[in-house]
Image: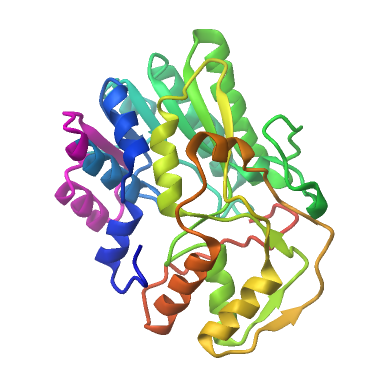
Amino acid sequence: MLEKIETEPQLEEVLSESDEKVIKTISEISGDILLLGVSGKIGPSLARLLVKSCQIAGCRKRIIGVARFSQPAIRDFLQKSGVETITCNLLEKEQVRKLPRVENIIYLAGMKFGTTENQPLTWAMNVYLPALVADHFRNSRIVAFSTGNVYPLVPVSSGGCKETDPVGPVGEYAQSCLGRERILQYFSWKYGLAGCLIRLNYAVELRYGVLVDIALKVNQGQAIPLTTGYFNVIWQGDVNRATVQCLRLCQSPLKIINLTGPEIVSVRQVAIRFGELLGKKPVFQGKEAETALLADASMAISLFGLPQVTVEKMIYWIAAWISSGGRIYNKPTHFEIRDGNF
């Protein structure tokens, strides 16, 4: 594993690294793979992982990325990586109906930021769109991203919510994400749609994520709110590898998996560690509440093993990235928000 990551091309290679389990999955599943909403934060590296894994496995599969591609550079990047691309506004029913009906769908589309300003669009993206997709691809396997936000805030001492625990979404974003799950579950019940729901929290790489948010505050001398004092986190490359493996876990009723790291991470301790690496003293505001948005990753670990990248390694990589002036997406996660208003 690299001591540090110095360039974006190097980062893209790390995020799309394959392993034996991914290669085995690619070799065993039949059919091509289509990624809906491929131009977001997860899609490009996941699509590249699929292309690289097919090459290693010697499998001839089409890897197809679908999005509006409002940033043409992302489409160019994908095409150069061996990904076929289709430009499509997924909210337009007739455009969805023209998409090729391949055997494997990875559903990445959704809306979080700006929810408070545009609730109707949020519900259209997170509930109406899944219905269009599930209807068109009812005979495919669908691995769909959901979120740990469908759970309620729970005591830190609980260890986090298990997949079998009651949901309790706070705010319209989380409610609409539960709506996405329910729509897909309905189509699974009605048509036998086979799928897997990934409740993810929180994915991190060097340009985006909870750890980046904390590191930037430390580096800039900004106060770090502690009320939401604990969180889960997982490296984006580990998310990608687990997502591919979910293609062989699709079933009806849909399988639900919490995808996150094994530990409950302290905001305070992370900030202190970043302070050591960046040569800055963290500034804290408030104190930790007894509850947080947390998920138990026991099932994911039993299925995929422990994540390859530890929290300490992520912290070290991010500190080095920020110190060297690496590009940041400037999209704060707002993980500290407790009322669901994103």
Q: Please give the name of the residue rendered at 42% of the width and 16% of the height, measured from the top-left corner.
A: 138
Count of labels in the image: 0
Give me the residue at 56% from left, 25% from top.
255
Q: Is residue 291 magenta?
A: no
Left or right of 49: which side holds 282? right
Image x and y of residue 258, in percent: 60, 39
Q: Quadrant of the N terminus?
A: bottom left
In this rendering, position of residue 76 left or right of residue 90? left
Based on the displayed image, in which of its 4 quarters is residue 47 positioned? Answer: top left
In the picture, residue 341 is in which quadrant?
Answer: bottom right
Q: Nearer the viewer, residue 329 or 58?
A: 58
Q: Nearer the viewer, residue 45 or 335?
A: 45
User: Compared to 153, does 34 lie above or below?
Assistant: above
Q: Position of residue 162 (x, y in %)?
A: 70, 37
Which region of the structure is painted magenta?
Answer: 55-84
Quarter the C terminus occupies: bottom right
Residue 61 in the magenta stretch? The answer is: yes
Residue 324, how many percent across, how many down?
Answer: 37, 83
Q: Could you say where residue 208 lies in the image, as x and y percent from the top left?
A: 47, 64
